[in-house]
Image: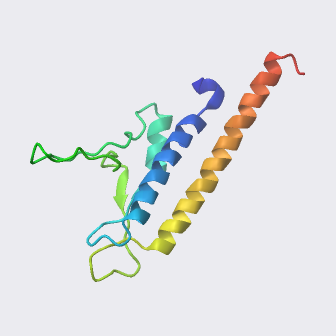
Amino acid sequence: MTDIFGIHAQALQIRAQRAQLLAANLANADTPNYKARDIDWRTALKQAAEGQAAPKAFRPELARTNPRHIEAFGEPAFDDDLLKYRMPTQPSLDGNTVETHIEKAQFMENALQYQATLDFLNGKIKGIRKALRGGE
């Protein structure tokens, strides 16, 4: 399948994970000392093209200090070479680096690129179906 879809299947997966990371930034816009994060898209795509593993699925690496603590979920756990902290254009007093207008723009751009990749893959699949049916 890799020969048929090329890098687009991995790109779709990376874009989905980036969307979750950007959504986490937006959700923590009012959390003191929260640092906005993003992935290095080019490095992630290059690693996928070279056959390396795609970014890890969402799973936190948190220590439970008490057996009664609830197990954490929902935070992204990317490789350190892919995860980057966003530098704010206007730092806030509470240490939060999330700038909602930038995060929303990045989220929207990522969503459009995700949809374009999905449309491309859909076109490939339609072409394969047509070839299998004999051009009907």
**Res 67 → quadrant:** top left
Q: Residue furthest right?
A: 136
Image coordinates for residue 88, horizontal then vertical, percent: 38, 75
Image vertical order of residue 135 relative to residue 70, above or below:
above
Quarter of the C terminus within the rendering? top right
Q: Is residue 67 above or below residue 4?
A: below
Task: Please name the residue shown 49% across and 53% down the image.
Answer: 19
Quarter of the image with the N terminus in it: top right
> Residue 16, position in %: x, y?
51, 46
Q: Is residue 66 left or right of residue 29?
A: left
Q: Nearer the viewer, residue 85 or 104?
A: 104
Q: Position of residue 80 (x, y in %)?
A: 30, 49
Horizontal side, residue 90 vs residue 133: left or right: left
Q: How is the image coloured?
A: rainbow
Numbered label tally: 0
Image point 35% across, 73% down: which residue? 30
Q: Residue furthest front?
A: 68
Horizontal side, residue 128 vs residue 108: left or right:
right
Q: Please name whichever residue, 43 or 111, is drawn nearer the observer in this view of the structure.
A: 111
Q: Is 37 placed above or below 91 here?
A: above
Q: Residue at x 48, y 50 (%)?
A: 42
Q: Residue at x 33, y 49 (%)?
A: 81
